[in-house]
Image (tube, grey):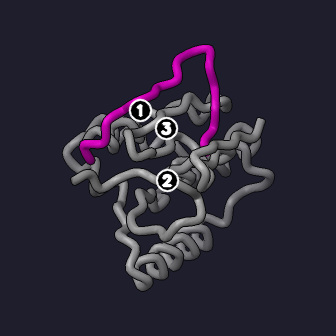
Amino acid sequence: MQNFGITNESGKLKRVLVHHPGKELELANNDPVAHHFEQPVDVKRFRSDHLELLEHLEEVGVEVIRLREVLEDNKKALEQSLECPNLVFVRDSSTVTKKGVFLFRMGLPTRRKETPVIKAAHTALDIPIVLELKEPETFEGGGFAILENNSAVAGL
């Protein structure tokens, strides 16, 4: 039985892939605009707040799958993750449906290194790739939602 995918945005969250930010988040402070941050990041607070979120998810019974643990045997993907300060926003680079994953090609050039990392994670989790955007196409999953009536919406 498959153990992945969503059918709508308002159902109960059972399982989620997350990336707890590490030292790569500091890259955002070297050039916030290039990484789509309005101002430098308080790295210590960001990491603390994110850890608190993960703890709350686990407290309510959500299975939290940590990206770095999934990739522990993939040195290349782990190294590439250290170049991705926005990787904490895992939802932006892919959407997982009941049929498999849609991999997006990010519009912001500094974010394009995220997709191969996320692709490696989905592969390690045995989630089939059903759509992979290629150049020149770009799309970010943060603006994508599957609705309850088998419809999808996308912000442009």
Instruction: Find the magenta span and give its range.
Output: 125-141
Few, some or many residues within 10 Å of mark 1 (<14, 14–19, 20+): some
Q: Which residue lies furthest to the top in this view?
A: 136
Classify residue 52 as left or right of residue 106: left
The earlier-in-sequence mark between 1 and 2 is 2
Q: In which quarter of the image is residue 153?
A: top right
Are the two marked residues, 1 and 3, in contact with CB atoms closer than 8 angstroms? yes
Magenta-span inclusion, residue 3? no
The residue under the point 40% across, 46% down is 98
Classify residue 100 as left or right of residue 142: left
Identify the mark at residue 114; answer none if there is no mark: 3
Q: Mark 2 points at which residue?
A: 7
The residue under the point 57% across, 52% down is 89
Few, some or many residues within 10 Å of mark 3 (<14, 14–19, 20+): many
Q: Mark 1 points at which residue?
A: 116
Few, some or many residues within 10 Å of mark 2 (<14, 14–19, 20+): some
Q: For numbered disc 1, what is the local secondary structure?
A: helix
- Mark 1 and mark 2: span between their CA atoms? 24 Å
Q: Which residue lies furthest to the bottom in this view?
A: 59
Q: Position of residue 3 (x, y in %)?
A: 29, 56
- Disc 2 marks a residue whose amino acid type is Thr
The residue under the point 59% across, 56% down is 148
Q: Position of residue 85 (x, y in %)?
A: 56, 48
Identify the mark at residue 5; answer none if there is no mark: none
The residue under the point 73% across, 56% down is 40
Q: Where is residue 128 in the image (x, y as percent from the top left)?
A: 31, 36
Are the two marked residues, 1 and 2, in contact with CB atoms closer than 8 angstroms? no
Q: Which of marks 1 and 2 is in front?
A: 2
- Disc 1 marks a residue whose amino acid type is Pro
